[in-house]
Image (spheres, rainbow, N blue to C red):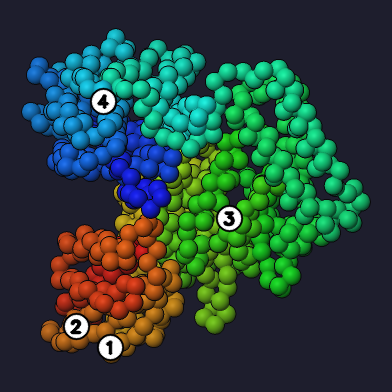
Amino acid sequence: MHAFPREETGLMVARRRAICIGIDEYEGEARLNLCVADATEVADYLEQPEYGFDVDLLVNQEANLPNIRRALLSVMDEDLEFFVLYFSGHGLVTDLDAFLVTIDYQPLAEGVSLADLARYTEKISQKTQHCVTILDCCHSGAGQFGGSRGLITPAEIDRGLPARTESRSLLAACRPEQVAIEDSRYGHGLFTYMLLQGLSGDAADPYGNITIGGLSDFVDRNLEAAGAEQIAVLKGDSAGRVVIGSGFTPIAAHNLPEYEKRRIIAQGKQFLEDYTSQLTNHPDDWRNYGHRTASQLLPRTLHWFEKQRKEHKDLRIDTDFSQLYAAITNRVKQLAEIDLGTNVGEGVVTRRIGGGGFGTVYEIACTSGQKLAYKVYHPTEYGDSEKKSLFSRGYKAMQQLDHPRVIKVKGYTEAPIGFFMEYVDGPNFRDLPNIIEDPVEVLQFLLLTAETIAHAHSRPVIHRDIKPENILAVYRTDDNTWIPYLTDFDLAWFDQATQVTKQAWGNISYSAPEQMANPRSAAAHSAQVDIYAFAQLAFYAVTGSDPVPVGRADNGRLLQEKLNSWPVGAAAQKFMEWYDRCSQSAPYDRYQNFRSAMDELADVEALIRRATSTTVTPRGALNEIAFALSGFGAAGEVDVSGGAFYSTSGRTSITLTASNIQSSMNVERFDLEARLSLDRITIEGNASNERKRAKINNRIDEVTRSMEGVKRKPGNQGSFETFISISGVECGYAGIQRARLSLSHVIEAIERT
């Protein structure tokens, strides 16, 4: 996670660096649950424009001792305005020192000692104006970490990491005699949860700045209000106010004078009267232009009221102001009750398509003759601020995705709360007129669905609500094939998200156990949630029935009955094993990333195709590889002299060629070369195209380093071009899978933003 240096009036300002470390995956009983979520969300905030930090995020396996030391050493070489070190994980004490425990812990090499950390930060502070260390490393109930060693205490923090210089501060989770609390209800350590609230802007001063002292005071006040038996510790010397973030909504330090409060309330009444006077009550006029006019006028008034509530907290408990605010929000809710024939700006509502837990979806006829879908948030749920936030987050998640089979959003509305999106003329998977029965067709449908989910994960966006209703299907008549489209990201979580759900909305048959039991945990927002749900979708695709929630034995029996009819027993057995692993109760017992789960399912499909097909020629092998990379787009279009097509996302142009064809022991082999190119590089930031190309090539080298016989050769055409060669590809199942896996991982590295 890297941000680019901020620019002001064309000049480069002093840079800001941060290292955020979070570790959950300690061995055995020492495993933690919330530290990665802690570090990830702190990093997200620090990268926002109001802070402008260039962040190194080290979590789990990345958070080993060499990597942490390497990151600290790199900071020592820079002239910086600000440096922040954040750590969430285990701490322990030995007879010699106290340690922040790294993922590669072993006796006599426990991690980063606080004595060493003091030396690092002292060296960094010599070239850095402000240096802040934030530690949330004492967790109640975490138990012991090896032998008789105990958890690190604030006393060891106090002794081992002094803050002597004027630009150096330490913010620790609690006083020496206390322990820091980890509470699954918050999805974070309690200290970090309060810290995140402050970083979001709630700790801003009357000038819209967030200072280290103000952040500490905010955390302290909120810990006290929550009844927590811990008090955050801030120590160090600073010359004046140390501003870590700016540009937030100023929050008044004192209550409004009575005359100013009356002035604001009078202004609010006038805004409400002005809005009401421009509306019509005649039903036909309301449908034709009234609803559209109200939708355009109301957001400005609503923004004014919300700005006043944000800046002046005492207005939130003022009766008169609260009544005015309720009147405005009621008018927003009224706009969500839409009659057929109503003009909503983009077009006219022609029918109600359906609804779900978050909103109602309408079909919109545009003046251009095209159709849109309009999803409107339920007016009865307007008072649920968290659910409204999830609805908005779903829109933002879909904005980040540009896959041709992920439904595209077209625009967000605030009155009513809703958004327009691409209209897909087809049923959802549950409402298909006839179930797909051929095993190969079932698996192809699932793999096409999986490809859209893998694309989302590469952004990274976790869907968290995969179920038949959220897969739309379009029937393609030229090859009699159902094509899946992924939609409805209301429960999505992505790395820019700053809130975690309190409740486990979703279909219980498809929700992972950790979503239901502990929806605020880091595990409930990981890739394993989608892996679990996708496996249940596959269960439905094969059996035509919903899986029994947390009923693996019953599900296994029904699935086995259906799989008995498959033509290839090895494929049926492999599918059963795949489903069982994806459905494990513990997230860490499932596949560790979605791409791995997808690759295993592709092996099942290839087993059936291999057993039911004739001998594969080099051309046939190329077409099998092309199908795996592009879905149905390239089928039959590739021969040994070449063939061009696009990846399933439509972003990467692919050309496959075969050379050096040889026969040995009745098996043909050939050398495969794939030309991969992009018309446009979508990596965000201000770097030059040369740096962006270098970044993509580094990704490719990372994924190909362990692949035998796979080499990269740079190209020089267009925005980006590279050539991947794979030597000795067999014209059979093993060779096709080897090439498919190699190239699919390279393409994912190219398309990842």
Question: Dividing the picture into quarters, in which one does residue 53 lie?
Answer: top left
Task: Work out how far the residue at label 3 is from the one at label 2, CA to CA, in angstroms.
Answer: 44 Å
Secondary element at tag 3? helix
Q: In the displayed orientation, state which residue is furthest to the bottom.
A: 641
Label 4 is placed on what type of residue? Arg
Label 4: which secondary element: strand
Between disc 4 and disc 1, the foreground one is 4
Q: Residue furthest top?
A: 177
Along the line of sight, which residue is nearer the eye, 534 or 563? 534
Q: Is residue 139 above or below residue 636?
A: above
In the image, which disc is placed on residue 168?
4
Other-residue count near label 4 (Cα within 10 Å), few / some / many at <14 / 14–19 / ≥20: many
Q: Secondary structure at mark 2?
A: strand
The residue identified by callout 2 is 670
Distance (Cα) linking label 1 and label 2: 10 Å
Looking at the picture, tell me which residue is in the foreground, 450 or 169.
Answer: 169
Q: Amino acid at mark 2?
A: Phe
Mark 1 vs mark 3: in front: 1
Image point 57% across, 80% down: which residue?
Answer: 477
- Give coordinates of residue 236: x percent, y percent: 27, 19
